[in-house]
């Protein structure tokens, strides 16, 4: 059952509620990395509501709705502001925005959450974090875990930089085990080379030949820039978060 809380645009109330939610996340058995992810995303969402939505006006309220289970953390934050055009939100990974310090909140939230959604007005953000079930590490040291009907393969910069070929080998390992719907999570990579790009193209083509699908999710700014500069995004779809990638895979499967 979800909990609904209304607080004023006051930092002491904001941080008190944040601490309460984070304590409940920790008590629900989530690991340190998941607790950190929720804290960062929640802090960004609440401060954005306080500063940009309600303009630090203490007379205005922030509505928070959250539910924490053993499988999932969901939090919605809504302010009384005018909202914003989410489609026109500047991408901090593009051009001069790379050098600016502001405007990175939503991008950071997407990097740590499984899914991020906005209402039509743009004054409500919904955050979702799925617990990683059945986390496995393959023989190359890369972690992978099942999310609904797909397998998420996390690229660890250490092993990948030492042996780029393990990306293709890891994809092939999943395909050979019947995991034909694959999301390659790029969020840990700060850079990407031609060998890894080639492995991703080869893996995507192999997945398609087996009636499957491979997509990329959560690229860091420099990686995203290289992916698009190399036109890899014309071959493999790239998505901001895991849930959007899953939706694309589902739609493709249904069409087939």
Image (spheres, rainbow, N blue to C red):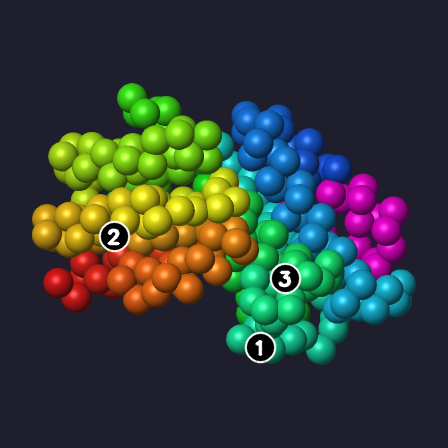
Whether residue 243 appears in this view of the structure is no
* Of residues 134 and 237, the one drawn nearer to the viewer in this rendering: 237
Residue at 63% x, 48% y: name it: 41
Label 1 vs 3, first from the N-terminus: 1
Q: Mark 2 points at which residue?
A: 201
Residue at 56% x, 67% y: name it: 94
Label 1 vs 2, first from the N-terminus: 1
Residue situated furthest top in the rendering: 139
Gap between marks 1 and 3, in whole Å?
Answer: 17 Å
- Could you say where residue 38 lies in the image, as x and y percent from the top left? 61, 41
Query: In the image, 147: left or right of 85?
Result: left
Position of the C terminus, as image quadrant, is bottom left
How many C-alpha atoms fall within 10 Å of the one at disc 2: few (<14), some, or many (≥20)? some
Q: What element carries label 2?
A: helix
- Could you say where residue 100 lies in the image, as x and y percent from the top left? 71, 62
Range drawn in magenta: 1-18
Q: Name the residue under label 3.
A: 98
Instruction: Determine which quarter of the picture holds residue 96.
Output: bottom right
Please, is residue 254 above or below residue 218 in the view? below
Residue at 43% x, 47% y: name it: 192
Q: Inspect the magenta stretch and tell me whether residue 250 lies in it.
A: no
* Of residues 113 and 21, the one drawn nearer to the viewer in this rendering: 113
How many C-alpha atoms fall within 10 Å of the one at disc 1: few (<14), some, or many (≥20)? few
Residue situated furthest front in the rendering: 194
């Amino acid at each position: 059952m979800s909990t609904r809380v209304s607080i004023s645009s006051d930092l002491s109330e904001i941080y008190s509620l944040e601490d309460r939610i984070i304590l409940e996340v920790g008590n629900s058995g989530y690991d340190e990395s998941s607790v950190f992810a929720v804290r960062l995303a929640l802090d960004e969402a609440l401060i954005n509501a306080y500063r940009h939505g309600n303009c630090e006006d203490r007379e205005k309220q922030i509505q928070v709705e959250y539910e924490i289970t053993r499988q999932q953390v969901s939090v919605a934050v809504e302010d009384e502001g005018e909202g914003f055009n989410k489609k026109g939100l500047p991408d901090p990974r593009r051009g001069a925005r790379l050098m600016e310090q502001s405007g990175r909140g939503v991008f950071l939230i997407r990097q740590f959450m499984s899914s991020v959604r906005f209402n039509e007005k743009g004054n409500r953000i919904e955050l979702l974090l799925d617990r990683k079930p059945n986390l496995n590490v393959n023989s190359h040291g890369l972690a992978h875990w099942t999310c609904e009907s797909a397998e998420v393969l996390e690229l660890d910069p250490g092993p990948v930089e030492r042996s780029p070929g393990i990306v293709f080998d890891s994809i092939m390992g999943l395909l050979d085990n019947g995991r034909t719907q694959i999301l390659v999570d790029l969020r840990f990579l700060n850079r990407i080379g031609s060998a890894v790009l080639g492995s991703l193209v080869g893996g995507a083509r192999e997945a398609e030949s087996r009636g499957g699908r491979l997509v990329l999710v959560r690229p860091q700014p420099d990686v995203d820039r290289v992916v698009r500069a190399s036109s890899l995004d014309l071959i493999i779809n790239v998505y901001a978060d895991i849930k959007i990638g899953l939706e694309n895979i589902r739609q493709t499967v249904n069409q087939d």
